[in-house]
Image (cartoon, coloured by chain):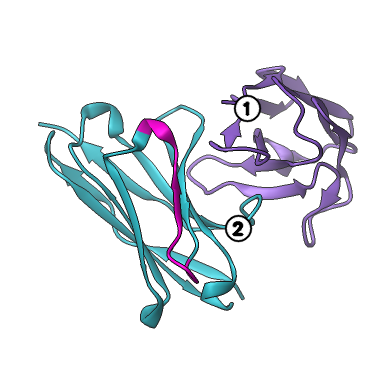
């Protein structure tokens, strides 16, 4: 069955960077885009970007351009999302979600807390 | 960016009721719309894709309709486990955008 397993929760200082991983299993890794979506506490869902694991092509939401980098390692079926220059309003749960159109399977989420 | 306006923001209904949630897109998106259910502390789960196709083994009590700019999610024969927040998502153009969510309470 399709599984997306994300890395553990993180606590970071403002200005630092965080890297969240998402390990895929149960399907052909290069056959589907991987999205990143975040959710601030008590708030709605916000799409950040995606990567095509087959080609490495990426697409970011403009508001994250310059701060977010999504990469993949096809040898271990894992996608990474790095967010730099963290601010307190980056505190959120970050989800990876498989899908070249509407995401169909989601990781369990990784809570990133940004606090001094 | 395409704005997705979802209504109502919250509603309360009883077991066995039928409810409808709507999403309006700020411009035409064909049928490039999905609906998700999210329970507290959990990841969203896709219910509907391509505006009206039921995802996998989701209960047939869930149905979607619409095209262009107006969409709806209908839940019939409400069950206690339907208590959740529901989101629409457009994937017609970048950035993908979600509606603000509808919190459904089962009385």
Q: Colour of chain B?
A: purple
- Where residue B86 sits: x, y (%)? 67, 34
B74 versus A84 height, above or below:
above
- Where residue B28 sits: x, y (%)? 77, 27
Q: Which residue is mark 1?
A: B99
Range covered by the magenta-colored residues:
A53-63
For label 2, the crowd category at 10 Å Cα-Cα, with few meaning under 14, some 14 to 19 and many 20 or more, is some
Determine the residue positioned at 88% across, 36% down.
B65
A7 versus A66 height, above or below:
below
Nearer mark to the viewer, of 2 and 1: 2
Q: Colour of chain A?
A: cyan
Determine the residue positioned at 24% across, 39% down.
A113
For the residue pair A24 and A100, the one nearer the viewer reads as A100
- Where residue A17 sits: x, y (%)? 17, 46
Determine the residue positioned at 69% across, 28% down.
B104
Q: Which mark is residue B44?
A: none
């Amino acid at each position: 069955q399709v599984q997306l397993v994300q890395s553990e929760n993180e606590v970071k200082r403002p200005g630092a960077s965080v890297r969240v991983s998402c390990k895929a299993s149960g399907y052909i890794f290069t056959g589907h885009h991987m999205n990143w979506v975040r959710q601030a506490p008590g708030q709605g869902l916000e799409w950040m970007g995606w990567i095509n694991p087959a080609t490495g092509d990426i697409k970011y939401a403009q508001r994250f351009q310059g701060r977010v980098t999504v990469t993949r390692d096809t040898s271990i079926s894992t996608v990474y999302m790095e967010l730099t220059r963290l601010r307190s309003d980056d505190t959120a749960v970050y989800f990876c979600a498989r899908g070249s159109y509407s995401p169909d399977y989601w990781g369990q989420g990784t809570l990133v807390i940004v606090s001094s | 960016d395409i704005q997705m306006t979802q209504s109502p923001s919250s509603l309360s209904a009883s077991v066995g009721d039928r409810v409808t949630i709507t999403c309006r897109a700020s411009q035409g998106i064909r049928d490039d719309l999905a609906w998700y259910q999210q329970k507290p502390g959990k990841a969203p789960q896709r219910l509907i894709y391509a505006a009206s196709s039921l995802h996998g083994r989701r209960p047939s009590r869930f149905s979607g309709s619409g095209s262009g700019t107006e969409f709806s999610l209908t839940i019939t024969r409400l069950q206690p486990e339907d208590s959740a927040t529901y989101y629409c998502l457009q994937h017609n153009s970048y950035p993908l955008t979600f509606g603000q969510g509808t919190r459904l309470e089962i009385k």
